[in-house]
Amino acid sequence: MKQQSSGSLNNVLLSVRGVSKQFGLNIVLKGIDLDVSAGEVLALIGGNGAGKSTLMKIIMGIYQPDEGSLSVAGEQITTFKPSVSLAKGIYMVPQEPMLFPNMTVEENIIIGFKEKAGELHKRLVKIMDDIGWHLDLDRKALSLSIAEQQLVEILRGLLREARILILDEPTSALTFDEVESLFKIVEDLKAKGIGIIYITHRLAEVFEISTHVAIMRDGIITLKGKTEEFTREMLVKGLLPPNMDDQDAKEAKGSDKQLDYSNKKPIFELKDYSGYGFENVNLSIYPGEILGVAGVVGAGRTELATTIFGREKVLGGKAILDGKDVTGLSTAEILKAGINYVPEDRRLNGLFGISDVACNTTSSLLGSPEMGKFFLNKKREQEITQKYIDDFRTKVTGQEQLAGSLSGGNQQKIIIGRALSTNPKLVILDEPTRGIDAAARGDVYSIIHKLKEEGVAVMLISSDMEEIVEMSDRAVVVFQGRIRGQLSKNEISQASLMAESFGVDKKESEGGEA
Amino acid sequence: MSYLKKILKARAMGSFLFLVLLFFLVGCVNSDFWQPISIMNCFNDSVVFTFLAAGIAFVILTGEIDVSIGAVLGMSSAVGATLLRDGSSWQVAVLAAVLVGALIGLVNGFGVSVLGIPSLIFTLGVNGVVRGLIYVYTGGAWVENLPADYTKFSNQLLIGSLTVFYAFAIVVVLAAHFILTKTRRGKYFIAVGDNISGATLVGIPTRQTKIMAYVLCGVFAAVAGMIYTSRIGFITPTAGNNYEMKAIAACVLGGISLTGGQGSVIGAAIGAIIMSSISRILVFLGFSSDYDNTITGIMLITIVVVTTVMQNRAVIKTKHEILRARTAGSRGAQTEQAATEKGGSV
Amino acid sequence: MDRSVSAKIKKWFTSWEAVMLGILLLEIVIFAAKNSKFLMPRVFLGSINDIISICIISLFVTFVMITGGIDIQAGSIVGLTSIVVGVGWQDGGLNIWAAAGLAIVVAALCGAMSGFFVAYCNVQPMVVTLGGSFLFTGIALLVSNMSATESYKGISGFPDSFIKLSKFKLFGVLPSQVLVFLALAVVAYILLHKTKYGRKIFMIGVNQNAAEYSGINTRLIIMSTYVLSAMSAAVAGIVLTSYLGTAKSDLGSTLTLPIITAVVLGGTLSTGGKGSVVGTALAAVVIGILKFGLPLCFKVSQQYLDIPVGLLLLIVVIGRALAANPKVSTWLRGKQKK
């Protein structure tokens, strides 16, 4: 692999040399070297926990590196403060835009500037004209869509005359059309000679807009160079841990058998089911089946799951569990009926961080008499908690350990344990392996396989296409709130899933891949 | 034109209209109320709360709270009044009181912003200590026999029946409003309360901003204390007891959100007028002023419940609209598919 | 088994309750050394009425604060309860016990109203209960105006049975107020730490969303904590009325800040999710003894007592904030190793 592309050496904007960072005992960055030149779009890829966001926070001056140096356009940075980095022309558009919701768009953009408001207004209008965006400057930020909020963030960066723009997973919350317009903007900025660091999880985007690519894994950069020198396969290999190939093969074997659907009745059915974010969904799940639900983020999969789980209003249609109508029941009633859900956002909706492992495991059972009628049956609680710790090989110091102090993988095991504690007939897993390490991922997969053997129906929502391919007996793809494709075991492939997820016809996508 | 629109949209506008409506309705029942002098007296009497509410508004706008301002008022006025009684000039007395207020504000700001202690709890502790210190300082006795020059000052009229104090309050509130909305550093207060991590990201010094808010709050409470001294003419060790709650209530009535980032100092001043006019209004309506707290409580609860429910509804509605737009997009997308495919197949 | 018990004991000794107990013992030792009168039960327990309301109410305000809320209206409910008992009995012609029952129901309704706005309308608890404190103080005054007796005098002349309530002493030593406090502390302890209801309160405070996803009816439970704290304020109001022999509408108006102080000092996290009845009870007693011992043993004037209480709160929260600071905690650990 070529380490440096010779063409951009003369115009290096940002240069990172040997940066290391450690939090407590956790070494997050181990000697990072990275360059960004004018007019370059550097795609930075890496799984959760690879150290991307820590590196970006160091570049933004929010953290101070333990070792190594940082220079902008040849000038060494000595003090690490957001205000210094901003003054040097670095601007980061965070994954979740951080606007001031109660201020207008204009106030949001010009806050923190020393210049007069009138002058800034003129410059802002000129920038918008140059790029050809039209945004009502008097609107309050809270009324903007996520895509518009990102535009505001980018405008902030441009008005600051940022020379280096960091985009942190900018498409993760965007609709398909919005992604298209964002790409056009990136092209414009590239042409203006701005250096862009583009953080993403999506390989397709790398080839679509980046000029250079770097892959991070476990705090080091494993691969970097011009995008055109790489193929998809090479990038995937760079993302995987060195000995991941064997494990993949093993997992695949376990689920290779075709499920026997003869004389089986679906345990759960949706009929013309509609809610906020999805419409007219029809699907059925059989006992002992893993139904993969693919689609891009924002396609409406999580909304579908949370509506089934009684968190949102049902707008039409029916949900039937084991012959019983469960449409529009409350979460407590749904739990009793036999559905449980592992939420997508573990921190926000799943984890009780400052509670111990036992409390976390049994919280779904507080509504059932199993944990006692009025008094809390502590003995039963211990038994249940221990069962799931043993079954899932969860690494804890004891049942009293606080859940927040566990690693992501172990937290997820506890929440899956909670979902199983109510003995559900259907378990909905929403991105169950997001942000957990490879070993824990393997454990989660074997838990899912065991569930399948026990005859539990599993709805597996995942943005990780490989996961869907490996695990599912059948898969559906959600595209803009509707079920677009139903694929049987032998039809499921990354290519077919990808094509359906992006609303592309099969023929077309096969043509594109070849 | 757009400026007029902005004024009409401001949260304080609702409170202002409420105040006008209130005065109008009271006048309908008893037309004596419509005389300039009785309206003016509503304004003049609100001067102490205007300063307290405007000061605490800085803190509330940054998303924090300060329950020590009643004690700050008591302490600074005790210090100022003692100096006056012992023959100091009023300038020295006011300066000393302001220093006391600023110092306590600094302590509050340090505890909340540097040590990171929840503001309600820290200022609660400071409140207890300062309340006790008032007794230590005054020996539990009243501070009396203040020079008549100083106490007379509260009756001094500027124009018509507008007192000098209230004229001063108007100037200060307008200046504070200008600073908060028009100056670069002034805008930081609202930005910090609106979204603190966003503020850090654009390079706003969030800690200093919060400390500054507490210092200003202390200074405003001290000024309120000196005006209180002039109006009442003596200081008891319990001066300003429970005033913090009334000042917070005035801010809420004036459209300031306790979560921070929303509202204005002008709103706080209007809220202070509403708060302090209620008992006067009750008299004009022929009710006993015993209804004062009941009416305040009902007004406070009604206003916050209605605005919160309306806001939450709006947020949920926007969320649903965004989600609906996504599914609606799929209907449109099918017809536009040819176009998107062109872009996708490059 | 032995090991887990000893581990539990060890854990308890490093807990916040143990720190509070240490402070309590320290207080007793210092005060007793200075003035032996301090240890005489008659003197010691005789002063209980000054703090009994704080002790009783803070037990249940702990529940509210564990859910992540705050209750600054409890003090105003004490006055409302007192005057409802008085007016109900004197002017309404009710039996005194029926009047007390009525007062508890009225308080529960007040708590339910505020709880409803907090839980079901998502209004900030601080604002709702601030409004509530104005409203209930006001209503108390209006109720007292309904009476033939002028409000500043208060209503007195209650039947003996009611007055005796506060004059009774178990074994001739333990006043009934202390018994009420101990009984309520046991009830609160069991409710919060031994039942499913208590567990739900904690889970809501730690993460309300996750609690919703666990099928917990978070709104109903949040509302119920406000009802409980209002009812405890009613009990405190009745006890206080019985002791004073007079029903007044402005009783309890200065209680708000000491109650919150006791709850926070007792180790309850103001952001919710953590706290204990034992901690709150110990903290309330610590404050009580401080307020009783300082004047008795050190001749500190009654009026200065806000200073030590405020200082105690500040020292505790600053100490906790510093201990949570990574730099300080690593320094502390390093020192322990040596």
Image (cartoon, coloured by chain):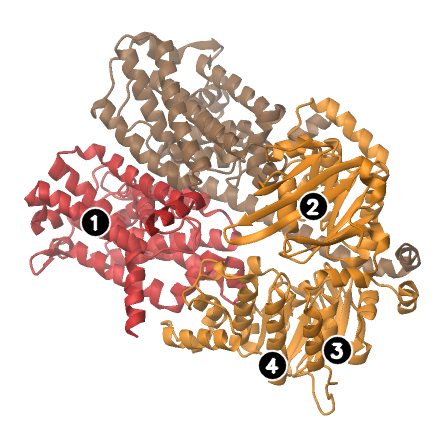
Chain colours: A orange, B brown, C red
Can you identify the residue that label 4 sits on?
Answer: A450
User: Callout 2: residue from which chain?
Assistant: A
Q: Residue B317: x percent and y percent? A: 67, 52
Q: Nearer the viewer, mark 1 or mark 2?
A: 2
Q: Which residue is mark 1?
A: C24
Mark 2 burial class by Cα count in 10 Å: few <14, some 14-19, many 20+: some
* Label 1 secondary element: helix
Distance of label 3 from label 2 (alpha carbons): 44 Å
Mark 3 against mark 4, which lies toward the viewer?
A: 4
Q: Amino acid at mark 4?
A: Lys
User: Is C125 situated left or right of A58 in this image?
Assistant: left
Residue A474: which disc? 3
Quadrant of the image containing the N terminus of chain A: bottom right
Q: Label for residue A23?
A: none
Query: How much space separates mark 3 and mark 1, taking CA atoms?
Result: 65 Å
Q: Earlier in the sequence, mark 3 or mark 4?
A: 4
What amino acid type is highlighted by mark number 1? Leu
Is tag 2's residue or tag 4's residue first in the polypeptide sequence?
2
Q: Which residue is mark 2?
A: A33
Q: Amino acid at mark 2?
A: Asp
